[in-house]
Image: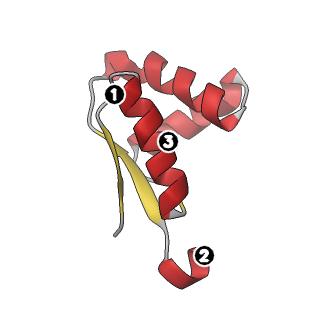
Amino acid sequence: MLSEQGPASLQVSTLPAMSIAIMRVLRAELGIDLMNARAVLSRVLDGDYSGTLPEMEYLARALRKSGVSAAATRP
């Protein structure tokens, strides 16, 4: 799917104070520990976190439910 349709990115437009809320969602949805959540958060904030469009839409939806403005985008 990724090779056919290309990658999508997870974009967040939020204040740094929302970093904790973002990490909570990442930990819950991805099943990762705190150290890995910090690494993924850094990639998300840098605009460097990508995957398939359905994966990024899923995370964006979970983030929006937590009050974080998020969207899945394609380059």
* Amino acid type at mark 1: Val
**Of helix, strand and loop, which one carries label 2?**
loop
What is the CA distance from the residue labelled 1 to the residue labelled 2?
Answer: 27 Å
Q: Quadrant of the C terminus?
A: bottom left
Nearer the N terminus, badge 3 or badge 2?
2
How far across and down, in percent of the image, does residue 50 sit?
A: 51, 57
Q: Quadrant of the N terminus?
A: bottom right
Looking at the image, is 49 positioned above or below residue 51? Answer: above
Looking at the image, is 14 positioned above or below residue 60? Answer: above
How far across and down, in percent of the image, does residue 2 sit?
A: 58, 74
Question: Mark 3 sits on what residue?
Answer: 59
**Of helix, strand and loop, which one carries label 3?**
helix
Residue at coordinates 42% horizontally, 39% vertically from top-left? 61
Looking at the image, is 20 positioned above or below residue 25? Answer: above
- Please name whichever residue, 57 or 50, is drawn nearer the observer in this view of the structure: 57
How far across and down, in percent of the image, does residue 23 sit?
A: 53, 25
Residue at coordinates 49% horizontally, 37% vertically from top-left? 42
- Residue 19 quadrant: top left
* Amino acid type at mark 2: Met
User: Residue 1: which disc?
Assistant: 2
- Please name whichever residue, 38 or 58, is drawn nearer the observer in this view of the structure: 58
- Residue 8 quadrant: bottom left
User: Residue 14: which disc?
Assistant: none
Question: Mark 1 sits on what residue?
Answer: 68
